[in-house]
Image: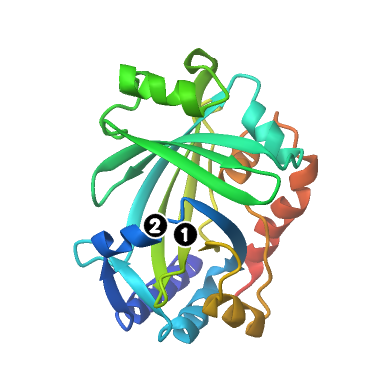
């Protein structure tokens, strides 16, 4: 109970700090989509997020949807029966693909998204609007002829080879710098459910931060991170959720990340 109360107290302080940020509406964020970008990830304990936000306050807008400064996400990852996409990531293949359905709760939009990473570290994302994931939990019901054509063009995998395996839910803070050259997503209270095994996992003690830039543009947040001695740390929610909920998967190259998840449970400052 004490840990729960401490977490809620920290989350409330974070919400209050976000009130100090100048808001930006979703429509004005359209120019900062960064669909072809360089991503840098960081993982910190929840207790370190408040001072990070305080340092960034004057440099960033916060995305505002319906007067809310956080957004709720529900994501369902599609995968092959032999976990081909997970294996490519876990074995550190530079060129890889990920396919997911993502429901944006506040706007009630669901997109089928295909994400490709190339050998230069750039991420390209293509997506198509589909019917609501939360109202149609079986992803096959969302496959219209238009969606099928989209997958044929963008995916390495056939529809018949894909099945719903891993899903997550989390809260996201989205910041955009005042130069409109980068976006920062901050994911909180991440919960996993594995449809294949039925297992659940929670990493609510961690914050996953992703800095998304169009090339090597100046980044106020990178400077803030360096000053606070926060270093880049690769962290895939899909891979970590899969590894935490499916003990049959290979995880040799994820051991360090799994140890980090365990270690940061005990970090309070």
Q: Quadrant of residue 265?
A: bottom right
Which residue is tagged 1? Answer: 187
Mark 2 and 1 residues: CB-CB less than 8 Å, in contact?
A: yes
- From the viewer's perspective, is 118 left or right of 31? right
Q: Residue at x 56, y 71 (%)?
A: 217
Furthest-right residue in this view: 252
Q: Name the N-terminal-most of marks 2 and 1.
A: 2
Q: Residues within 10 Å of mark 1 (few under 14, many from 20)?
A: many
How far across and how far down the image is residue 178, in percent? 39, 78
In the rendered image, residue 80, in percent from the top left (x then y), is placed at 58, 22
Image check: 210 left or right of 63?
Answer: right
Tell me if residue 131 comes above or below residue 253 in the rendering: above
Residue 144 is marked as: none
Judging depth in this view, the residue of 81 and 129 nearest the camera is 129
Could you give the CA–CA distance between mark 2 and mark 1, rounded to whole angstroms?
A: 6 Å
Residue 186 visible in the displayed image: yes
Image label count: 2
Q: Which residue is mark 2?
A: 171
Mark 2: secondary structure: strand
Instruction: Examine the rendered structure and indicate whether residue 119 appears above or below residue 207.
Output: above
Q: Nearer the viewer, residue 59 or 241?
A: 59
């Amino acid at each position: 109970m004490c840990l729960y109360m401490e977490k809620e107290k920290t989350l409330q302080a974070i919400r209050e700090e976000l009130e100090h940020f100048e808001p930006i509406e979703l429509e004005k964020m359209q120019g900062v989509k960064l669909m072809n970008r360089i991503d840098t990830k960081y993982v910190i304990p929840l207790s370190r997020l408040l001072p990070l936000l305080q340092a960034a306050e004057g440099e960033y807008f916060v995305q505002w949807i319906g007067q809310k400064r956080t957004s709720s996400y529900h994501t369902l990852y599609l995968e092959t029966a032999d976990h081909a996409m997970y294996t490519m990531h876990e074995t550190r293949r530079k060129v890889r693909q990920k396919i997911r359905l993502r429901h944006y709760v506040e706007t009630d939009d669901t997109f089928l998204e295909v994400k490709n990473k190339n050998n230069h570290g750039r991420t390209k994302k293509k997506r198509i609007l589909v019917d609501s994931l939360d109202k149609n939990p079986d992803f096959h019901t969302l496959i219209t002829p238009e969606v099928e054509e989209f997958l044929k063009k963008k995916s390495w995998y056939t529809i018949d080879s894909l099945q719903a395996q891993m899903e997550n839910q989390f809260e996201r803070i989205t910041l955009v710098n005042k130069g409109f050259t980068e976006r920062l997503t901050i994911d909180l209270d991440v919960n996993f459910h594995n449809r294949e095994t039925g297992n659940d996992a929670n990493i609510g003690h961690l914050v996953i931060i992703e800095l998304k830039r169009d090339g090597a543009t100046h980044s106020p947040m990178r400077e803030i991170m360096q000053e606070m001695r926060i270093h880049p740390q690769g962290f895939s929610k899909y891979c970590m959720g899969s590894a935490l909920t499916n003990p049959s998967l290979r995880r040799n190259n994820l051991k360090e990340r799994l140890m980090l998840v365990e270690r940061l449970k005990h970090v309070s400052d």
